[in-house]
Image: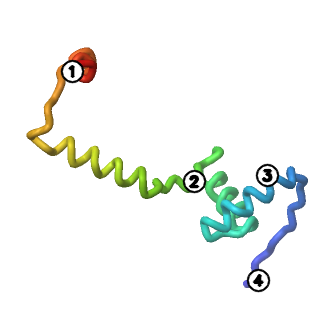
Amino acid sequence: MANKTSNVSFRIDSDLKAQADILFSQLGLNMTTAFNIFLRQAVREGCIPFDITINTPNAETITALLEAERIARDPSVKRYDDVEEALKELKS
């Protein structure tokens, strides 16, 4: 059984298209595949369906998150009951 396809043509700002091409490429998609994913999901959910984002933290952020986790688990790290108490000690 042959797939039936239709061509869709619309105008889009050329800078926006270039940015979208870069994003979709980073996600391993081309423009046609990205639009097909969007349309299928929209029809399935009956709404504008989702965000596809590249929210990968950089190395510095990952290091900071790991450090924060380490500090949170360390029982020898001084704890404060409120911000004023912590600020008072910082100023002294």
| Mark sitting earlier along the chain (4/2) | 4
Q: Identity of the amino acid at label 3?
A: Leu
Dot 2: element: loop
Please state which amino acid type lies under the numbered disc 2: Thr
Work out whether 65 lies above or below 22: above
Placement of 30 over or under 14, stated as above or below: below
Q: Residue 49: give x, y in percent of width and height.
A: 60, 48
Measure the C-alpha gap from mark 3 to mark 1: 50 Å
Q: Secondary structure at mark 4?
A: loop
* Crowd tier of the residue under label 1, counting other residues whose Cα lies within 10 Å: few below 14, some 14–19, many 20 or above: few
Residue 11 in percent (x, y) is at 90, 53
Q: Earlier in the sequence, mark 1 or mark 2?
A: 2
Near-viewer residue (92 or 15): 92
Kind of element beneath mark 1 = helix
Query: Which mark, residue 16?
Result: 3
Q: Earlier in the sequence, mark 3 or mark 4?
A: 4
- Give the CA distance from mark 4 to mark 2: 33 Å
Residue at x 59%, y 54% (from the top left corner): 52
Cα distance, mark 1 to mark 2? 41 Å
Label drawn at residue 2 = 4
Dot placed on the residue nearer the N-terminal end, 1 or 4: 4
Can you say whether 86 is above or below 64 in the image? above
Work out how far the residue at label 3 is from the one at label 4, CA to CA, in angstroms: 34 Å
Q: Which residue is mark 2?
A: 53
* Dots 4, 2 in contact, CB < 8 A: no
- Residue at 43% of width from left, 58% of height from top? 59
Crowding at dot 2, Cα within 10 Å, few <14 / some 14-19 / many 20+, comes out as few
Identify the residue under disc 1.
Answer: 89
